Structures are given as C-alpha cells and as structure tokens.
Amino acid sequence: MQTFTHLEFLELAQNEKTLKESLNNLETAEPERSPKKQTINNILNYSKALSVKKSKTVDYIEMILN
C-alpha cells in the first residue's frame, strides 16, 4: 500500500476539487440535447410502415405499406 505525505495529500485534494469544478462546469455549460417528440414519432411511424423481405432473386425487397 502506498503512503502519501501531507503535502501530497493536499495536492491530491486540490486536484480532486479542480476536477469536480470542471465537471460541474461541463454539466451546466451545455444542456443535454434531444430530438423533438415529433421527430421520434416520425421515425417510429416509418419503421412501422416499412416492410423488408428477403428475396431469392434479389437480396431484399423494401416496401412502404401505407
């Protein structure tokens, strides 16, 4: 087990404090972005309407069922 001197411990504590402040600044600087609800609904509706079938003559046949 490694032992630390008092000065090393103080330096470690200061580094930890600086890193925590940096992390907090990152979290508050830019809010998390997410797609609009309408965009998600459009993608889900498209996936429900899309039909993909394997074919013997061509690899896959894609059809929109609407």
Image: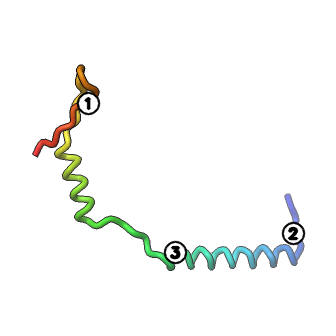
- Separation of marks 2 and 3 at Cα, in angstroms: 32 Å
Q: What type is the residue that disc 2 sits on? A: Phe
For the rendered model, the colour scheme is: rainbow
Q: Which residue is tagged 1? A: 60
Give above or below for 28 relative to 39.
Answer: below
The disc label shown at residue 23, or none:
none
* Secondary-structure class at tag 1: strand
Q: Earlier in the sequence, mark 1 or mark 3?
A: 3
* Secondary-structure class at tag 3: helix
x then y, percent, for residue 3: 88, 65
Q: Earlier in the sequence, mark 2 or mark 3?
A: 2
Instruction: Single out the residue that lies furthest toward the top.
Output: 56
- Separation of marks 1 and 2 at Cα, in angstroms: 65 Å
Q: Residue at x 69, y 78 (%)?
A: 17
Q: Which residue is tagged 2? A: 4
Q: Residues within 10 Å of mark 2 (few under 14, many from 20)?
A: few
* Picture quadrant of residue 8: bottom right
* Picture quadrant of residue 16: bottom right
Q: Residues within 10 Å of mark 1 (few under 14, many from 20)?
A: few
